Image (cartoon, grey):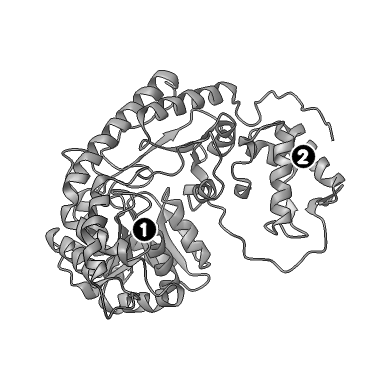
Amino acid sequence: MERLGRWSSGRGPLYVLLAARLRELIDEGELPPGTGLPPDRALASALAVGRTTVVAAYEQLTVEGRIVRRQGSGTRVAGEEAAPLRTTTDAPSFLHLLEPRDGVILLACAAPDAPPPELVEAYTRTLPELATTVGDIGYHPMGHPALRRAIADRYQQRGVPTTPDRVLVTTGGQQALSLLARALVRPGDRVLVEAPTYPGALEAFREEAAVPRALPVGLPGLAAAAVAHDPAFAYVISTYHNPTGAVLPALPRRRLAEDAAAAGLALIDDEVPAELGFPGEPTPPPLAMYNDQVITIGSLSKVVWGGLRIGWVRALAPLIARLARLRAVHDLGGNIPAQLAAAYLLPRLDALRRRGAARRHAGHDHLRAELARHLPDWPAPAVRGGQTLWVRLPYGDGTSFAQAALRQGVAVLPGPGLDANGRGEQYVRLHFVAQQDELTEAVRRLAAAWQDYRAPGNRVTSPPALAI
């Protein structure tokens, strides 16, 4: 029931909050008539609450006529069953953005929380160019030429020959993933992904009815999996992997690119986190250095600011043209002032990267120190870059603990949402991009949640009053 989102972060008894969220989903059509709801015990276990909380919420909705409960046939939304609707996102990270709540510390979604001075300067510097623009209606489905040249030049500097006709500008890395999925996937196609991986990628692939097949981080065994599954493409985060922070070493990096070429398999290298190394850490080469047909995704949202919705795809020119046609159907192109600012910023990015690297490294060390002090039985391996820690819980499961943490006012991502197989139950993802005082408070709340938490099946709960 990922669509429940942050149901427990409000005020009042838990059964009232749960009933309110279910009522909202029913009234908005997210749970259409005839939809089956989980059994009492199963939902209670998933939400880390007592069974009586679920029973009380269901009873309230039954009295209101919104659900029907029958012995032997379970609990369903009231009304005649209709044709299935295409639901909106269930991804926890997106739900936290769609349903913000005051007072909740978000360790579930990571990006710089304010535009840096360099971005403000970039807008200021490019305003005269914008003011003198004539003969341009501003529709550029492939992206503004100045930005495409700047992105191509950056790949050239990294040793990957690139011309502007091989670059498509997108509204962030997420749109890049969505366009690629639409271009490359037919319903039912298999795609190879890492387990765990970025949940937004899984969401984009499933939106096009792809069937993800998981391999370990780094996609070892790609050649055999390509034969076994005949996938439409493979997707990897080769540098500062989200969520584990892993970096694919040089030899496996080259082997992965060469195996994909030998199999004739499209390989997507998501380099959105690639510029997030800590001080002194080099940025490894893109997989495209070893296989020019590798499709590379990049973005400025993590290294500059999440509100600068500038991403891109580097690929062979025919695929870029195809993606541009798909994009034209949606929005005719992105924000031109933002693209001009990004074109100015890209050649001057190194100073901003160095400052951000030092800040992230300090946040990483601070978060790990606070976890060691307050939650010493939580293993939180150090990483060399990126934004996240992949933390294994000593017992229980990440899904139910995430609900317990939310009741203490901190949002984390549970492991199953980042695993195509729904595994990773014992893990949660935490980011270290927030200010250090906020990280301190977040860990304090996590420790309070952990103190109250009991693994499903071993919890002792007191029943809420059934005042309905």
Query: Which of the two residues, 43 or 125, is positioned nearer the viewer here?
Result: 125
**Mark 2 or mark 1: which is in front?**
1
Q: Amino acid at mark 2?
A: Ala
Above or below 391: residue 162:
below
Q: Quadrant of the C terminus?
A: top right
In the displayed image of the protein, which residue is found farthest to the top?
A: 373
Q: Label 2 to label 1, Cα distance in Å?
A: 40 Å
Q: Position of residue 338 (x, y in %)?
A: 31, 61
Report the amino acid beneath label 1: Arg
Q: Nearer the viewer, residue 184 or 151?
A: 151
Q: Is residue 359 above or below residue 115?
A: above
* SS for callout 1: loop
- In the image: residue 53, left or right of residue 380: right
| Label number found at residue 309 | 1
> In the rendering, at what x and y percent does residue 56 appear?
79, 36
Residue at image position (45%, 37%) is 107
Q: Mark number for residue 222?
A: none
Q: Residue at left 26%, top 49%?
A: 248
Q: Nearer the viewer, residue 161 or 264?
A: 161
Tell me where residue 403 sits by quadrant: top right
Residue placed under numbered mark 2 in the picture: 57
So how many labels did they put on this image?
2
Visible residue check, residue 212: yes
| SS of the residue under disc 2 | helix
Going by the image, does 284 lie left or right of 211? Answer: left
- Circle 2 crowding by C-alpha within 10 Å: few under 14, some 14–19, many from 20: many
Residue 1: horizontal and vertical position, in percent? 64, 48
Image position of 466 (left or right of 202): right
Residue 47, above or below 166:
above
- The part of the image, by quadrant, that contains residue 368 is top left
In this view of the protein, can residue 423 be seen by the observer? no
